[in-house]
Structure formats: structure tokens, C-alpha cells
Image (cartoon, helix red, strand yellow):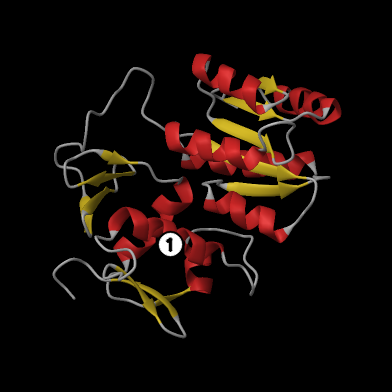
Amino acid sequence: MADAACVLVVDDDPGVVDLLQDYLGGYGFEVLTAGDGTAARALLERHRPQVLLLDVGLPGEDGLSLARHVRERFDIGIIMISGAGETVDRIVGIEVGADDYLTKPFDPRELHARLKSVLRRYQRPVAGETVPGPPAGGQRIPFGGCSLDLDSRRLFDADGNEVPVTQMEFELLSVFAERPNRPLTRDQLMTLTRNREWDPFDRSIDIRIARLRRKVEPDPKNPRVLRTVRGFGYMFVPPGKE
């Protein structure tokens, strides 16, 4: 890789940790490791990795709880890893803000591909460059009580404060922004956001829409911006176009 990225691996299996250190290190990644949630939290206070590879079944604090903590405080990619392969783990992982999900045993090449994909989505301005609030002249799309800045890939509330969104949530908002007042099926949304994990029973879109409604709708229980089109999918209705 031209620019080495930092990855934090949180797993209590020494075999998995050694594998990922050797494999990802061979691609130029800086790899930090932690065996439990306490060690991971301590590392996150001193370092800022671009991606967190997080095992669900950690001793003590589980991976889902740690993922929720990380998503509330840091804008980094999260890939959950589980040995169970349970659908409920995947759904909860997405609900707490994970960007992707892998089941053990996994092919390191697949992990590498998914890692690169998440990294691309979390690209930031060059080191030292800061953007204090919505950039002047940026392309901002109103979403209920918020506005989406397509240039900086950030969401802001009415007071100009940044509202944390995951990469998948940003991609969904972008897809809606480009297609106002147009009903979109779950299949279309999965395809347009380049999510290759779609299957007919996948509810991840519904979960993410529910999370977005809590962020952009004045009344999430009565959505007016991200509307459900019964029997079809969802539609973005810009403010003032109701």
C-alpha cells in the first residue's frame, strides 16, 4: 500500500492474532493487537487506527459492546469477526455500527479485500488538514433537521454540529440525495451502496434506515423524510416537498 494504514485487531485467539499480524504486515499495514476490551480501550486512547477488526466473542466485555463504545466516540471503520456465524450476531453488529462482518474461519484474502474497501470509505483529508464545521460552499443536502455535506462526507445538525454516521449510513444518504422522491427497493439500495452481501432475507437496510431516522427525522416514529413505501421499499422526500 502506498500509505500504510493502522489496524487494531481485538481477538483473544493467539493464532488469529499471529495470522493477521503476519498477513496484514506483509501488505504494509501497521497492526496493533489487544486480547480484550480493556486493552483495546486503552490502545484507542493512545492511538487512532483507521480500522478495527473486532471479534464478537471476547472475554469480559463482548465485541458488540465494545463496537458500540467505539462507534459513539470514534470515526473509524469496524469489521466484526465471529466464530458463531449466527444471523443475530450479524444483525446486532450492523445495528451498533459495524461496517462489515466476517465469519470464522475466513480466507485472509477476503479479509484483505474487505479491509481495503472499508479503508476507501473512510478516507480523510491529509494529515494536519482540519475542517471546522461544514465547509463554505460545500454541497449540502437538507435531510429533515440535518444537512448532508457530500464533499466532506459528513452529516450536520441544525446548529452545525457533526452527527456521527457510519460509512454505510453515509452511502445510503448519498443514494437517497441523488434520487429524491423516487421509491427505491431494498435490492436497489444494496446494489447502489455496493453491498455485496445481499440476500432476500437480509434486514440490514431496514436496520440502517431505522438508525438514520433517529438522526435526521424530527419524529422518527412518524418519518416524513425517509418514508416507507409499503410493499416496495423507501423514498427520500426533501423538506418542503411533502
Q: Total label count? A: 1
Tag 1, which secondary structure?
A: helix
Query: In the figure, is residue 1 to the left or right of 136?
Result: right
Rendered residue at 77%/39% (across/down): 108
Placement of the C terminus among the 4 image quadrants: bottom left
Quarter occupied by residue 6: top right
Residue occupied by mark 1: 210
The foreground one among 44 and 199 is 44
Looking at the picture, how far across and down is residue 67, in whole percent? Answer: 57, 38
The foreground one among 44 and 171 is 44
**In the displayed structure, would residue 91 be above or below residue 163?**
below
Q: Amino acid at mark 1?
A: Ala
Is residue 36 visible in the rendered image? The answer is yes
Quarter occupied by residue 218: bottom left
The foreground one among 191 and 46 is 46
Rendered residue at 56%/46% (across/down): 98
Looking at the picture, how far across and down is residue 199, in whole percent? Answer: 65, 70
**In the displayed structure, would residue 101 be above or below residue 52?**
below
**In the displayed structure, would residue 123 be above or below residue 180?**
above
Looking at the picture, how far across and down is residue 205, in whole percent? Answer: 51, 64
Rendered residue at 69%/21% (across/down): 33
